[in-house]
Image (cartoon, rainbow, N blue to C red):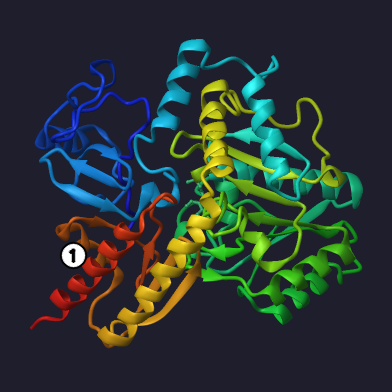
């Protein structure tokens, strides 16, 4: 089920939570009641999402409240996005201050906040350059264009091919649904973008064979491998980490052919895995990485980062009106401040270990969990077939009990809380999950 929660922007004006005070300038009543909001959606919003009957009022830390005043422990975080939780004071004040100073100017001019964020991102990764956009799909579009221009200008490719993995997810634009190795996202949207091939994730032999075949046709000398694009851990595809051997093989094949190894870090990036970037788990540097989601802590921003050696973009090659504007970059810098000052990576590792241990204990005691997978605070519990229910049942039951999670496919319940989640909140989540299993198993 496609899950979409209306996540709260730090500058949104929202109703006061019960028993909590806030400056009057920051908080006003929500625009309409639950019934009015749902009616407005029924009347005027395109039905592209399957939505739960939950109308969000406001949030604080790892909690959201609905318009009826019910509180939810948020282990969805806007699908792996609100890394600092909701209404984080530093994010609020950074965005508020930037809004008062200047919030948008064109990329025809220099933007100090963008320069600062670019410096911090390249310092945190193996990349040397950043291009800013607004979402994960756009970051991947930029990477796909870069790979094609690199292949055309450096490798002499007239028919560039990008290899991605089956069961991957790279976004919803035409090129990124084509990159996504799941036919359900492509159905009825053809003709798709040419130049993509797919291999089973973590299948080293299949990857090597696909690369060999691309260069093997003597009648098509311009058909060349441009890039291998991989998630370091498949998120939407079921919280499946890549093996080190798979990333090492991809690196070697790219080195041999001159193609680019590109990591889609839209879901794994910015510390969620317990390291700043997911590719770091494999000990293999990439040429290009893409990020969005946590980069602005919920304020829309994306980025494509690349090594100088493959930086083939010049003026006019790519652009975005909003990309890297002062407001979005102020949010990005506030997120980076939290990494610099709060020991966030250490916290993610500790809370991730706690979550994993708790899920493994539940697997042993409940018989409902077949496997616990993931890194840091991107964790999935694959349900057993024998348990008789699917991930959406667990997500629905948890929501009734006051906790938000997201399915990752039919059988995997995904846990992606804010990176600032506390020990007590992880314990509470595990207790609620145990109760949900009990309730779903009850005759
Ligand atoms: N890439 C990955 C790995 C993702 O998980 C997602 C979204 O879930 C995207 C790309 C697309 O990001 P966006 O929805 O911001 O376009």
Q: Position of residue 56 (x, y in %)?
A: 22, 40
Q: Which residue is mark 1?
A: 397
Give the vertical position of 73 relative to 368 (above or below). above
- Regarding mark 1 in the picture, which secondary structure is present there? helix
Q: Position of residue 362 (x, y in %)?
A: 30, 79
Label 1 C-beta lies within 8 Å of the nearest ligand 1 atom: no
Residue at image position (55%, 34%) is 332
Q: Position of residue 418 (x, y in %)?
A: 40, 50
Q: Position of residue 179 (x, y in %)?
A: 60, 56
Q: Is residue 191 visible?
A: no
Q: Quadrant of residue 312?
A: top right
- Locate the C terminus by quadrant: bottom left
Residue at image position (20%, 42%) is 65
Residue at image position (51%, 11%) is 101
Give the vertical position of 199 relative to 46 (above or below). below
Q: Quadrant of residue 122?
A: top right
Of residues 64 and 53, the one drawn nearer to the viewer in this rendering: 64
């Amino acid at each position: 089920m496609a899950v979409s929660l209306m996540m709260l922007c730090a500058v949104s004006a929202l109703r006061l939570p019960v028993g909590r005070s806030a400056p009057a300038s920051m908080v006003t009543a929500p625009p309409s009641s639950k019934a009015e909001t749902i009616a407005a959606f029924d009347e005027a919003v395109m039905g592209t999402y399957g939505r739960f009957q939950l109308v969000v009022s406001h949030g604080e830390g790892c909690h959201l409240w609905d318009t009826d005043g019910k509180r939810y422990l948020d282990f969805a975080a806007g699908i792996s996005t609100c890394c600092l939780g909701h209404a984080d004071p530093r994010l609020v004040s950074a965005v508020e201050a930037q809004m008062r100073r200047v919030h948008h100017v064109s990329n025809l001019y220099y933007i100090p906040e963008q320069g600062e964020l670019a410096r911090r991102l390249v310092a945190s990764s193996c990349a040397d350059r950043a291009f800013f956009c607004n979402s994960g799909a756009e970051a991947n579009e930029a990477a796909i264009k870069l790979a094609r221009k690199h292949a055309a200008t450096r490798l002499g490719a007239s028919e560039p091919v990008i290899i991605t993995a089956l069961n991957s997810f790279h976004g919803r634009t035409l090129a990124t649904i084509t990159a996504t190795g799941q036919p359900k996202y492509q159905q009825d949207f053809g003709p798709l973008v040419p130049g993509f091939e797919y291999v089973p994730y973590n299948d080293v032999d299949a990857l090597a064979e696909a690369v060999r075949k691309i260069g093997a046709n003597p009648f098509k000398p311009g058909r060349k491998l441009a890039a291998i694009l991989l998630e370091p851990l498949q998120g939407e595809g079921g919280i499946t980490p890549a093996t080190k051997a798979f990333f090492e093989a991809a690196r070697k094949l790219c080195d041999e052919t001159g193609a680019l190894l590109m990591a889609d870090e839209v879901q794994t990036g910015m510390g969620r895995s317990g390291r700043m970037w997911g590719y770091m788990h494999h000990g293999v540097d990439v040429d290009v990485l893409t990020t969005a989601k946590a980069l602005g802590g919920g304020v829309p921003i994306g980025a494509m980062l690349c090594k100088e050696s493959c930086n083939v973009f010049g003026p006019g090659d790519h652009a975005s009106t909003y990309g890297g504007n002062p407001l979005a970059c102020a949010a990005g810098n506030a997120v980076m401040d939290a990494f610099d000052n709060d020991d966030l990576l250490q916290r993610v590792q500790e809370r991730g270990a706690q979550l994993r241990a708790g899920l493994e204990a539940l697997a042993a005691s409940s018989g409902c969990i077949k496997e616990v997978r993931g890194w840091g605070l991107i964790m999935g519990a694959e349900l057993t077939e024998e348990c008789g229910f699917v991930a959406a049942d667990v997500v629905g039951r948890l929501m009734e009990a006051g906790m938000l999670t997201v399915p990752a496919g039919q059988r995997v319940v995904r846990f992606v809380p804010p990176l600032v989640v506390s020990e007590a909140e992880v314990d509470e989540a595990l207790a609620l999950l145990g109760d949900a299993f009990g309730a779903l198993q009850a005759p």
